[in-house]
Amino acid sequence: MAGDAVYVTKEYLHQIQAEVQELTTNGRRDIAQKIAEARSHGDLSENADYDAAKHAQELLEIRISRLQTMLSKAQVIDAKDFPDDKVYILSRVELLNKKTNKKIQYLLVSPEEADFEQNKLSVTSPLGKALLGKVVGETVETKVPAGVIQYEILTIGK
């Protein structure tokens, strides 16, 4: 079952728990109210509001189920648990794009926590995979639709 583990930070675990709490209380209550209101409009066979509310309920329950499954498999990890001599999950890496000569910084995280807008890069992404186990000064390559991009690892931290 260890292969099924979902590695998350303590902060992300709390975020998931809060979302489940919100969805199972307020989310379910709001959907129940929408369904009841739609039922009051009469014939359910041609009631678009009722169909929409039931579909929203289905999506809500799917989301709750996915989050609860993730929580049941969650293993909290901390950056302090890993050395900073190589790139690991929860490493903060500064990279130099060799083609554009621009620097970028990423935090390597589990796929569940990945958020490109916040520069949180999944360790399962092509670049994340290429970075794992590398040290400062090494160059990694990753394929993108426009070709191959080379990055030099400038720093590794937490």
Image: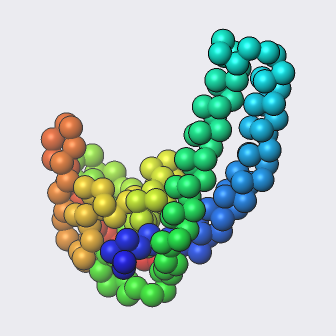
Q: Is residue 117 left or right of residue 29?
A: left
Residue shown at the point (77%, 38%) measured from the top left: 32
Q: Where is 14 relative to 57, above or below?
A: below
Residue 36 percent coordinates (x, y):
81, 30
Residue shown at the point (61%, 47%) measured from the top left: 61
Q: Quadrant of residue 44?
A: top right
Q: 137 or 13, which is in the foreground?
A: 13
Residue 116 percent coordinates (x, y):
45, 50
Residue shown at the point (66%, 58%) measured from the top left: 20
Residue 34 percent coordinates (x, y):
78, 31
Q: Where is 14 relative to 133, above or below?
A: above
Residue 92 visible, this angle: no
Q: 129 or 2, which is in the foreground?
A: 2
Residue shown at the point (64%, 23%) measured from the top left: 51
Q: In this view, does 31 lie to the left or right of 46?
A: right
Q: 47 or 109, which is in the foreground?
A: 47
Residue 82 percent coordinates (x, y):
40, 85
Quadrant holding the N terminus: bottom left
Residue 67 visible, this angle: yes
Q: Is residue 119 left or right of residue 83?
A: right
Q: How many marks?
A: 0
What's the colour scheme?
Answer: rainbow
